[in-house]
Amino acid sequence: MTSIVGVHGIGKYHYYEDAGGSADGAAAAVRAKWNAYLHQGLGGRAGGAGDYFTEIAYYAHHLHSGPPRPVRQMATPSKLVFADWAAQLGGPFRDAAGESLTGIAHLLAEWLLARLGPAAVRFAQDFCPEVATYLGGGAPRVRARDTVADVIRRRRPRAVVAHSLGSVVTYEALWAHPDLSVDLLVTLGSPLGMRRVVFDRLAPVPVRGRGARPPGVRRWINIADKDDIAAIPAALASCFDGVERDVSCDIDWLDFHTVRNYLRCGGANEYLKPFVA
């Protein structure tokens, strides 16, 4: 029997809507897709699906703050995330002289569009509000974190695969609930090390510039595409103790962050095969 729990990333609220406001229905729909993606990654035919993930911890409804908005219309916390994130990609800093925050966000959106195309701008419109809502603290952060912890406690998986913002929620959940234990944590396209945006706002706060593997995790493998603009830095061992290996992959420079491509690429196969039926 499989013993893997998945934790989704950004942009998954539409599953909740499609399921008529059911988090369980949303989780089931995401699970079906993750099983199909990993099936292909493990060498199965396209269109097939195995039974690899026992459950997907679904938390997107806890972070939803309305439909995606154009960058210049985002709320102030989201604009701050956008400015700090874009600065690490080479864009201007948020305190550029003579510009309001809205003006800087507009300039950054134009810069991002010219540099990486419309997909990157759409990504920013999902990424920035959800990161800002989660790391803004309060009930959304607690609920998302506890949702992940509850699934891990109930399912008692041997492995957890966490994508994108889900890696941040999972990291904090495992620290907040030290009774939880897993043999393997696999992070995909993780922004955990992103300075100013994520890393410096983690709970627990990194000590002397270093985070650490949660105490209940025996092994931690991190996988990042070389063009993933959310995985900054790509190598988490540069800022976290206890990362066993950073695996670099090359999935698709235009479709750089999707869990579909991460699970299909086979980068996690070596580590997940012992946990699949």
Image: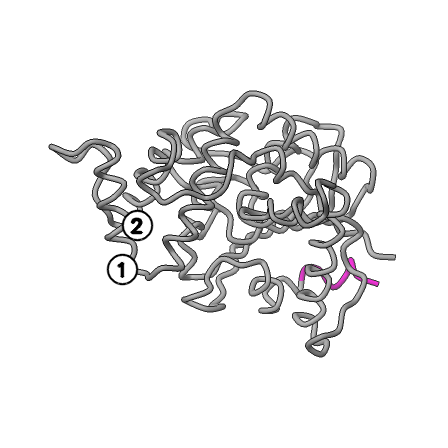
Q: Is residue 274 magenta?
A: yes
Q: Which mark is residue 224?
A: none
Question: Which of labels 1 and 2 is toward the front?
Answer: 1
- What residue lies at 31% left-to-right and 45% top-to-bottom? 86
Q: Main secondary structure of the magenta part?
A: helix
Image position of 69 (left or right of 117): right
Task: Decide which of 55, 246 is in the foreground and name it.
Answer: 55
Pointer 2: what residue? 89
- What residue lies at 52% left-to-right and 31% top-to-bottom? 134
Image vertical order of residue 248 relative to residue 142, above or below:
below
Q: Earlier in the sequence, mark 1 or mark 2?
A: 2
Residue 90 in the image: x percent, y percent?
25, 49
Pointer 1: what residue? 115
Image vertical order of residue 137 relative to residue 159, above or below:
above
Q: Is residue 5 magenta?
A: no
Image position of 255 (left or right of 18): left
The colour scheme of the drawn protein is one colour
Task: Decide which of 67, 226 is in the foreground and name it.
Answer: 67
Quarter containing the N terminus: bottom right
Residue 79 in the image: x percent, y percent?
34, 35
The residue type indicated by label 1 comes to Arg
Dots 1, 2 in contact, CB < 8 A: yes
Label 1 crowd (10 A; few <14 / some 14-19 / many >=20): few
Give the quadrant of residue 214. Answer: top right
Question: Which SS class for mark 2?
Answer: loop
- What residue lies at 47% left-to-right and 46% top-to-bottom? 126
Start-end of magenta stretch: 271-277
Specify the farthest residue to the bottom: 45
- What residue lies at 79% left-to-right and 66% top-to-bottom? 50
Question: Which SS class for mark 1?
Answer: helix
Quarter containing the C terminus: bottom right
Give the quadrant of residue 168. Answer: top right
